[in-house]
Amino acid sequence: MSLAESLPSPARMNLGVVRHDWTREEVAALFALPFPDLIFEAQRIHRENFDPREVQISTLLSIKTGGCPEDCGYCAQSVHYDTGVKAQKLMSLDAVLADARDAKAAGASRFCMGAAWRSPKDRDLDQVCRMVEGVKALGMETCVTLGMLTGEQAVRLKHAGLDYYNHNLDTSPEHYGAIITTRTYQDRLDTLGAVREAGINVCCGGIIGLGEGEADRVSMIATLASLPAHPESVPINMLVQVEGTPLAGRESLDVIDFVRTIAAARITMPKSMVRLSAGREDMTDEAQALCFLAGANSIFYGPKLLTTPNRAHDKDMQLLDKLGMQRME
């Protein structure tokens, strides 16, 4: 019996039903499907829950760049690596709100703010809370990524009006130690629990192309899909290789493998927004179109994703127009 024949069949997995008990064997069975069958199932489930022609657009701003004490092997902002990124202070409130106004004028409905911290100090959180309040007053959804949070800090952000907190798992539990040593997988799960307990929506996904195998991509999706509540947003990033980091110089990931991961996320988390995130600068229009067909329905727009390049805004709009797609209001 082949591996594919030994795995659970799609009919036995109740595809399209919201579940929190996904096994690695079941997710592996999705990855093993013939590509046309996988895309069909992902598109079918996507259409049951979303308008397939709509894409939610977010903007990501680095409000505090560089100087991070963590050793994430992909990150340009780590103090452990010489990447040319210099540590900067937290941006002023006025500067952040000016960027938020520009983002809204360009069509973004969610404004995400990222700070290169292991975890925020209370005095820094005061300023971030004011930023959240200011962006909310502009009529935009708010999201921040600040590192690890305590329960009290999560409650403070909730009271400020925060809609989403981003804290990615990055990869599988099995591969995690090869990428990061300064915090544990459980640390990440604890922060997600604090965010959820505070009543904030969760934005959580991972990075593909970290030297992991398919079994790790399976494990990461199974972990996300088996959380007590699915993340409302699931960013799937393709590694952007940064010179000076340990992960620079790796062979690029096959785009079909990336699309399979998008499809598996859509099928296992049918009501979540699946965001096609970092790495789009190096993707062809055809690759991105496949990701949309696989169930991606959110993107970041703007020239940068924290410190790495992102696809130009006009190219995004041209692609959506070419595909007959539009911004989600």
Image (cartoon, helix red, strand yellow):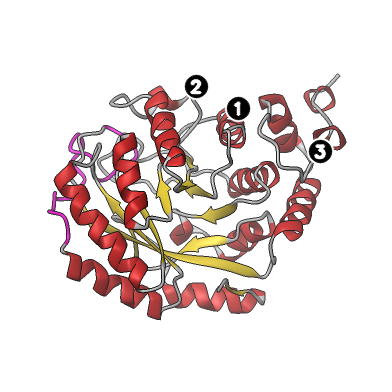
Q: Amino acid at mark 2?
A: Glu
Q: Residue at x 44, y 53 (%)?
A: 278
Mark-to-mark CA distance, 2 and 3:
27 Å
Q: Which residue is tagged 1?
A: 215
Give residue 127's position: percent from left, percent from top: 19, 55
Q: Which residue is farthest top?
A: 1
Q: Main secondary structure of the magenta part?
A: loop
Is 264 drawn above or below residue 292 in the view shown? above
Quadrant assignment, res 268: top right
Which residue is identified by label 2? Answer: 174
Q: Nearer the viewer, residue 27 or 97?
A: 97
Chain-order first, disc 3 or disc 1: 3
**Residue 26 seen by the camera:** yes
Query: Can residue 148 be seen by looking at this rendering?
Result: no
Q: Position of residue 225 (x, y in %)?
A: 61, 36
The mark that comes first in sequence, 2 or 3, is 3
Sequence-first tag of 2 and 1? 2
SS class, disc 2: loop
Q: Which mark is residue 293?
A: none
Question: Are discs 2 and 1 less than 8 Å apart at CB?
Answer: yes
User: Residue 321, how many percent across, how many down?
Assistant: 60, 79
Q: Where the C terminus falls, by quadrant?
A: bottom right
Amino acid beneath label 1? Ala
C-alpha separation, residue under disc 2 versus residue under disc 1: 9 Å
| Circle 3: residue type | Asn
**Point 29% across, 41% down: residue:** 153
Q: Position of residue 102 (x, y in %)?
A: 33, 77
Q: Nearer the viewer, mark 2 or mark 3?
A: 3
Q: Nearer the viewer, residue 108 or 241?
A: 108
